[in-house]
Image: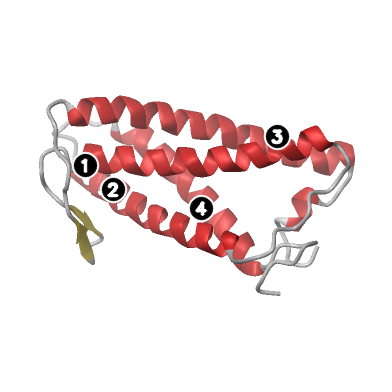
Amino acid sequence: MIRNTTSAYGWVSIAFHWLMALAVFGLFGLGLYMVELTYYDAWYRGSLDLHKSAGVMLALAWLLRLIWKLRNPQPQPLGNKVWEHKVAHLTHILLYLLMLALFVSGYLISTADGRAIEVFGLFELPATLTHANQEDIAGVIHWALAWSIMMLAGLHAVAAIKHHWLDKDKTLVRMLKPGA
């Protein structure tokens, strides 16, 4: 099953979910590693280029995922607690918005000096906005957004585990195999 139904996720939604989760956590880890490097460390430049390129690719995946989400039915939430459905919906919206803000802040950091972002040598994302202190301000925002996403993603994971172990419903299983 490729597409979603009102009762189950399809392969595309599941693949987007897990690939983006891995990329977000991977980029977070790389970001933590990068900020500890000095200019003279062997992998200073390489880690920065990888982080920027992967961030741009994640932003493109985010856009494709959003389009896919809007063009597919969404499975109905399981359980009968209306407040949980509302919190889950708000959490998903917040994750999407925080990621968008993270991409924008990363772009502003990377292009503050007026140079384009080279993406894996395939294409360049041009610098369009530059301002005094842009890199510093966007950097603080980027850091706060990254940590916010990690905390919200942790809450999201705990909720999925709670559904699986305590509620004994298929909320988690639906995101692991299509048609579940």
Q: Decide which of 169, 31 is in the foreground and name it.
A: 169
Which label lies toward us, 2 or 1?
Answer: 1
Which kind of residue does numbered mark 3 sit on? Answer: Val
The residue under label 1 is: 110
The residue under label 2 is: 52
Q: How many marks?
A: 4
Q: Which mark is residue 87?
A: 3
Q: Quadrant of the C terminus?
A: bottom right
Q: Name the residue rendered at 20%, 31% in the picture.
A: 135
Which kind of residue does numbered mark 4 sit on? Answer: Met
Q: Decide which of 139, 74 is in the foreground and name it.
A: 74
Counting residues from the start of the chain, the first of labels 4 and 2 encountered is: 4
Q: Tag 4, which secondary structure?
A: helix
Which kind of residue does numbered mark 2 sit on? Answer: Lys
Counting residues from the start of the chain, the first of labels 4 and 3 encountered is: 4
Q: Tag 1, which secondary structure?
A: helix
Rendering quarter of residue 60: bottom left
Counting residues from the start of the chain, the first of labels 1 and 3 encountered is: 3
Please say whether residue 36 is visible from this viewpoint.
no
The residue under label 4 is: 20
- The Cα atoms of the two marked residues, 1 and 4, are separated by 21 Å
Q: Evaluate if marks 2 and 1 touch, with contact meaning CB atoms under 8 Å apart.
A: yes
Counting residues from the start of the chain, the first of labels 1 and 4 encountered is: 4
Q: Name the residue rendered at 35%, 49% in the picture.
A: 55
Q: Name the residue rendered at 24%, 49% in the picture.
A: 49
Q: Tag 2, which secondary structure?
A: helix
Q: Evaluate if marks 1 and 4 touch, with contact meaning CB atoms under 8 Å apart.
A: no
- The Cα atoms of the two marked residues, 1 and 3, are separated by 34 Å
Q: Name the residue rendered at 85%, 40% in the picture.
A: 165
Which kind of residue does numbered mark 1 sit on? Answer: Ser
